[in-house]
Amino acid sequence: MHNGKQMAVERAAPAAPAAERVWRVLHARPRTEKKLAEYCRLRHIEHYLPLRAETKVYQRRKVTVLKPLFPGYLFAAFDAERRADVLKTNLVAQILETKNQQQLLCELDQVRRALSVNPTLGACPLLEPGRRVRFSRGPFEGLEGTVATVRGRTRVLLHVEMIGQALVVEADAALLETM
């Protein structure tokens, strides 16, 4: 289930040949990712739930908890027959089909390797140029703009459309939420 700091890919005796099993992204109902991972483990469904270690202080005691790196998402490989079973759990809001299996597996391997080096890493929204974002906290909280790359660095442009100008703000990705 987990090897100290993070959830590992569960490898069980597959119910279907590997050629028929396809990796999919399961969009889980709120706060059910670990229950869904346990369901997959019990049903011998290969899955991956990347977890990050987060330390909190409760009444002068440090407690480390494992939280999903990507809240609301679990990755699983199963055939068409298992699809209905997974949906019947009432833990899955939606199943997202993967267009490029090899790319997904490569990206998940990168996530696994990075978490094995530093289990406290956190996720942030993908900030590609042109994406609308809002500052969720910090001194610019509530301001909205567009992501741009200026001199090789990611910045947020605060537009003044009427005059065709923008203010450039350098921002930490952790302070931004996508719109």
Image (spheres, grey):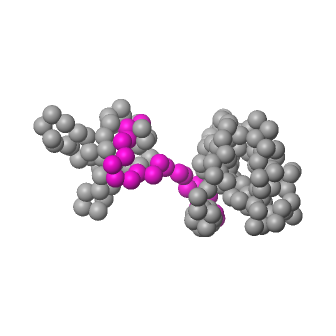
Which residues are drawn in magenta? 111-136
* Extreme residue in the top direction: 142
Q: Is residue 98 left or right of residue 132?
A: right
Instruction: Tell which of 32 and 82 is nearer to you.
Output: 82
- Relative image position of residue 27 (x, y in whole percent): 65, 43
Q: Residue at x 76, y 35 (%)?
A: 90
Front-most of 3 and 26? 26
Quadrant of residue 145 in the image? top left
State the image quarter where residue 93 is shown: top right
Q: Position of residue 56 (x, y in %)?
A: 62, 42
Question: Residue at the spot x=32%, y=36% of the render?
Answer: 144
Left or right: where 159 falls relative to 108: left
Residue appearing at x 36%, y 32% in the figure: 142
Residue 53 percent across, percent down from the top left? 64, 52
Q: Is residue 13 left or right of residue 98?
A: right
Residue at image point 20% right, 43% down: 167
Count of numbered tags: 0
x, y percent for residue 129? 34, 52
Q: Is residue 133 magenta?
A: yes
Residue 107 covered by magenta stretch? no
Residue 136 seen:
yes
* Placement of the C terminus among the 4 image quadrants: top left
Give whichever of 124, 98 is nearer the camera. 98
